[in-house]
Image (cartoon, grey):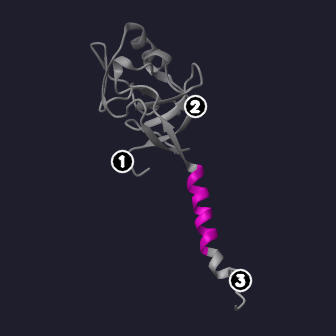
Amino acid sequence: MSPRRCSLPTFRSIIPILFFTAALISVGSKLMLIKVQENSMAPTLFDGQWVVVLRGAGRIDPGDIAVFTSPLDHQLVIKRCVLNSETNPVIEHGWLITPWGRWYLTGSQWDRIYIENGHPDGSLFMVGDNQFQSFDSRTYGYVPSKNLIGKVLLPGDHG
């Protein structure tokens, strides 16, 4: 029987492995997987569906879906941004009207939007696509930017 030689990997063969590992760690720290826990975003997102979130996505624009901590109970919440500090609310006959939909407002919700119209920079008005099953900014007001976790990446989104 001939002795088997055991060769150690060369430095040149380790570099791609190190590069790949570093890339995985970098990407992994920016992405997180969140399970939707309610139907407030139906028909866009459903209870039990998993979504990929780009952490620290920076700017969230009206139309984006984002994850944030609720200003009331600090639980993770997934909602659509419809107003930011650069957009003014359009309310007609008790409806908040945006390019992403219309949301019914009670009298107190309507008052809240107008009272908070001078909301702090970076705060967002977040609502559920399934408006009659969504507890959102219509009730708890604008969400401070410090509560944002990241942007939900839907198929076709490019960050």
Q: In this view, does 11 lie above or below 49?
A: below
**Whole-Å distance between the Cαs marked 1 and 3?**
47 Å
Write the residue at 60% across / 50% down. 29
Give the magenta part as a residue range: 16-29
Write the residue at 63% across / 79% down. 13
Which residue is identified by label 3?
A: 6
Is 61 part of what is drawn in magenta? no
Circle 1 or circle 3, nearest the eye: 3
The picture quadrant where one finds residue 36 is top left
| Disc nearer the start of the sequence (1/2) | 2
Q: What element carries label 2?
A: helix
Q: Are marks 1 and 2 in contact (CB under 8 Å)?
A: no
Write the residue at 52% across / 26% down. 143
Secondary structure predominantly adopted by residues drawn in magenta: helix
| Front position in the image: 106 or 84 | 106
Q: Residue furthest top?
A: 107
Circle 3 or circle 2, nearest the eye: 3
Residue 24 position within the rendered picture, expressed as x and y whole percent measured from the top left = 58, 59
Is 17 part of what is drawn in magenta? yes
**Whole-Å distance between the Cαs marked 1 and 2?**
25 Å
Q: Is residue 83 visible?
A: no
Which residue is identified by label 2?
A: 147
Label number found at residue 155: 1
Crowd tier of the residue under label 3, counting other residues whose Cα lies within 10 Å: few below 14, some 14–19, many 20 or above: few
Write the residue at 71% across / 83% down. 6
Q: Which amino acid does label 2 sit on?
A: Asn
